[in-house]
Amino acid sequence: MFCKNGWVMDESEARALLCRLLPGLRAGAEAGRWTGRLDTILAPVRDGGSAAEALTRLGLEPSAGEAPGGDRGGPGPHALWGGSRAEVTGAYVCPGTPPCPRRSGRDADGRPPVCGLRDVLMTFRQS
């Protein structure tokens, strides 16, 4: 259980938060030249270790009211040349084992989301 400043989340929520924050963390680490430290902190998580511990080591905590699972929406594919839109419902889910609870949709350009921890595309699950 991760608890800081009154915010409590379980390990799966901590994994989802870490996954969502990783693109920004990686960019910051590259700019600040601390990629080695980031990789050292993330290595145990990739091997099944605690994401909550990694968040603590990074000095991170969610903002007040922030949902750990990330967004649950996103635009669907654009209809081309006047074609009708085929409605497919579902969400992209964590490809990890064990999976975190993060759910996401495609971005504004139609690209599928990427798992921040493993740097692979998230898996689409039709509902």
Image: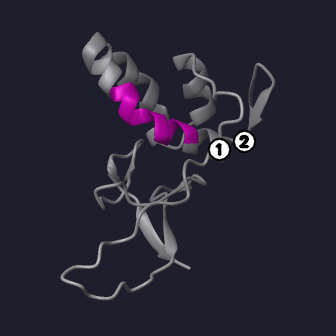
Tell me the residue that label 2 is attached to: 10
**Residue 73 in view of the camera:** yes
**Between 83 and 111, the one nearer to me in the picture:** 83
Quadrant for the C terminus in the image? bottom right
- Label for residue 46? none
The answer to whether mark 1 and mark 2 are in CB contact below 8 A is yes
Residue 11 drawn at (x, y percent): 67, 42
Of all residues, the one furthest to the right in this rendering is: 6
24 displayed left or right of 44 = left
Q: In the rendered view, would you say 52 is above or below 118?
A: above
Q: Quadrant of residue 98?
A: bottom right
Q: Main secondary structure of the magenta part?
A: helix
In the picture of the structure, the residue carrying the numbered disc 1 is 13
Give whichever of 58, 82 is nearer the camera.
82
As helix, strand or loop, the secondary structure at mark 1 comes to helix
Q: What element does badge 2 sit on?
A: loop
Q: Position of residue 84 (x, y in %)?
A: 33, 88
Question: 10 left or right of 100?
Answer: right
For badge 1, the amino acid type reads Glu
Mark 1–mark 2 Cα distance, whole angstroms, equals: 5 Å
Q: Which residues are magenta?
A: 17-26
**Residue 110 picture location, percent across and down:** 30, 61
Can residue 1 be seen here? no
> Mark 2 is on which residue type?
Asp
Q: Say which residue appears at 38% left-offset and 16% top-offset.
A: 37
Other-residue count near label 2 (Cα within 10 Å), few / some / many at <14 / 14–19 / ≥20: few
Q: Residue furthest front?
A: 82
77 over 29 or under it: above or below: below
